[in-house]
Amino acid sequence: MVERYARKEMSDKWTMQAKYQAWLEVEKAVVKAWNRLGLIPDDDAKKIVENAKFSVERIDEIEAVTKHDLIAFTTSVSESLGEESRWFHYGITSSDTVDTAVALQMKSSLELIIEDVKMVMESIKTRAMEHKMTLMVGRSHGIHGEPITFGLVLAVWYDEMARHLENLKQTMKVICVGQISGAMGNFAHAPLELEEIACKELGLTPAPVSNQVIQRDRYARLATALALLASSIEKFAVQIRHWQRTEVYECEEFFAVGQKGSSAMPHKRNPILSENITGLARIIRAYAVPAMENVALWHERDISHSSTERFWLPDSFITSDFMLHRFNSVISKLTVMPKNMMKNLNLTGGLVFSQRVLLELPLAGVSREDAYRIIQRNAMKVWEEIQQGKPTTNEKGESLYLQYLLADEELRAKLSEEQIRECFNYDYYTKNVDAIFKRVFKN
């Protein structure tokens, strides 16, 4: 279903045409390498490189008889050549072609994913700068904690994406390997130089050692890197879903003119894109399991990995690409509501300043235990008022918690009214935001 909405640039990399084209590129690179090593005459090599072609339909016809896709491919290509076809696929085995070709597909696909990550990072950065000082409440366990800024939330996201970007770049090195080492990887029928020349032609690194396949821990590294990336994107999406809850309503997915939220309830504006992202992340993570189970093949190879890779490789890339573009649209168009953020920040009648007051008491000679007792008992009074639905501010606009603290004789014996009121200053919580941003965004 996702492929229906996927970027054509990505989905085109995993069609049958693209698969066989990658095989052909590998085979041509091997022909060029044999030519440089003196085995294939110049004229024959030139004919193969210039004239070799295949037909997907013809390959399907042949495979229906041979039950072997690589043989069907080489037969189809040979039909486009003359006597020089005897050099096509010379001295190598099926996995030399297939695994090296998959490396080309993974490489070009991962390049697109890396572009996507950079795009998302830029969008997050733009919104972070926009809301660097937009106050909101920080939550732990879903409960109000202390004042933060929306920009700081986004800075955390940016930093997390930067780690994924680095991980993907490292993964690129792990997967961009080829092999032209023969049936058991022993180079019995071809010299090591053949592999080195062919891989260089293809822009790949020769695997230091192989058996009959490229080792699948490399593929598993890719699958887990995409799964981790998807998990972070889901994390961001879940946060947005919470913010869009009616009783929170601090952010909202862009709601277009004419858009409908419910067939029954015309008022609904649902976070459908973020919910979609959550579901897609589950699929991408699920593919990490078969990828890791593919690491254990019998001896020098079997083909238990092959069937799963026909699914998880294209689907992981296509779904990741789609998910990243969808999230980029969400974050870049996200409706942010600073007034509602401030309303929620004040929802608990000043309780978000409790630690600020707590830390003043030890400076005044009060023990940590006594300080905590004084601050907590007044906080519990506020919670009781909130439970009863009473106002959290008075006619002067003073928070309920401030009122209780100012009336606490034990506290007033240690802190002046001015000292207590100063603890309710939001600027205290944003004083280091610029410094944090410099650490995260570097410039």
Image: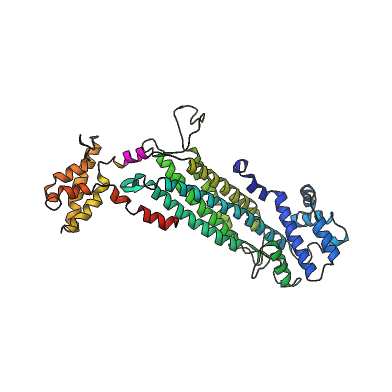
The image shows residue 252 at horizontal and vertical percentages of 44, 38
Q: Quadrant of residue 48?
A: bottom right
Q: Is residue 377 left or right of residue 320?
A: left
Q: Is residue 410 above or below residue 84?
A: above
The image shows residue 206 at horizontal and vertical percentages of 66, 67
Q: Main secondary structure of the magenta part?
A: helix
Q: Is residue 76 magenta?
A: no
Location of the C terminus by quadrant is: bottom left
Q: Quadrant of residue 178?
A: bottom right
Location of the N terminus by quadrant is: top right
User: Residue at horizontal 15%, vertical 52%?
Assistant: 415
The image shows residue 363 at horizontal and vertical percentages of 19, 58
Q: Report the magenta residues as a range.
A: 337-344
Q: Is residue 353 left or right of residue 111?
A: left
Q: Is residue 92 above or below residue 122?
A: below
Examine the rendering and report whether any part of residue 302 can be seen.
yes
Q: Is residue 384 above or below residue 106?
A: above
The image shows residue 290 at horizontal and vertical percentages of 58, 55
User: Residue at horizontal 44%, vertical 51%?
Assistant: 157
Q: List the single residue furthest toward the right.
A: 83
Examine the rendering and report whether any part of residue 184 can be seen.
no
Q: Is residue 220 above or below residue 330?
A: below
In this view, the residue in front, 62 or 362, is 362
